[in-house]
Image: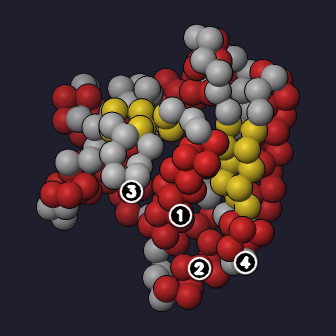
Amino acid sequence: SLWLALHRLGYETYGLHVSPGIKEWEFSRKSLEICQRFSERIGRPLIVFNLKEEFGYSIGEIARGTGRKDVCSVCGTFKRYIMNRVCRENGFKVVATGHNLDDESALLLSNMLRWEVGYLGRQHPVLPEESGFARKVKPFCFFTEKETVSYAIVNNIEFMETGCPNSKTATSKLFKRALAILEHEMPGTKLRFY
C-alpha cells in the first residue's frame, strides 16, 4: 500500500524484500512472489535481500544460535540493519516503512510498560539521518491496519493474508489486542495514545 501511494505521488521508489528463509507455509517464497508481481505492475525495481544467501543462515537458525525463543525480535533487528545497509549502499535518501497506527501504538505500549527510554526516544514518525543510520519515515503511522488493508483491497494489491508463522508467540499481538479492546470501548484511543 505504501509503495503504491508513494509511486502515485511521483517518488522514485525502490522496493525491498528481505527474505528471512521462513520455510513454514513457504512463507518467504510466497511473499517474495507477491512483491515481484507488484514490482512488475508498477514498473519499479525490487531489491531482494536473502538472509541465507548473504549470511549463510535463515532467521530461525540465527535465532536458535543466539538462544532466543523470540524469533520476531531477532528478525526485526536484522531487517532494520538490512534496510539501513541497502539504503546506504545504494545512495538512497530515506527508508520509508509501512508501519501503521496499530503497529506504532502497540510498540509504544510495550516500550512504556518495559520503560525502554532509549526506544521511546526513537519512535517518531520521522527519524533524521545520524550516526551512520539513514533517515527513516513512517508515512502510514496515523492510519490503522484496517485502513491500510482497505487501501490494498480497493487498489487490487495482493498481500499475504496470513501472518508470519514465527509470530505466534510475538508479544506485539498481545499489545495490539489490548489496544483493540480499549479502541472498541473508547474510539480514538489508539490515535490519542500515540
Q: Amino acid at mark 2?
A: Ile
Where is residue 40 drawn, in percent x and y? 85, 28
Dot 4 or dot 1: first in sequence order is 4
Q: Nearer the viewer, residue 188 or 103?
A: 103
Write down the residue under mark 2: 62
Q: Marks 1 and 2: in contact by CB < 8 Å?
A: yes
Where is residue 61 drawn, in percent x and y? 64, 81
| Residue 78: numbered disc | 1
Q: Amino acid at mark 1?
A: Phe
Q: Nearer the viewer, mark 3 or mark 1?
A: 1
For label 2, the crowd category at 10 Å Cα-Cα, with few meaning under 14, some 14 to 19 and many 20 or more, is many
Q: Quadrant of the N terminus?
A: top right
Write down the residue under mark 4: 56
- Residue at the spot x=51%, y=50% of the render? 84
From this view, report whether residue 156 is shown above or below residue 73. Answer: above
Q: Marks 4 and 2: in contact by CB < 8 Å?
A: no
Dot 3 or dot 1: first in sequence order is 1
Q: Nearer the viewer, mark 2 or mark 3?
A: 2
Q: Nearer the viewer, residue 46 or 186?
A: 46
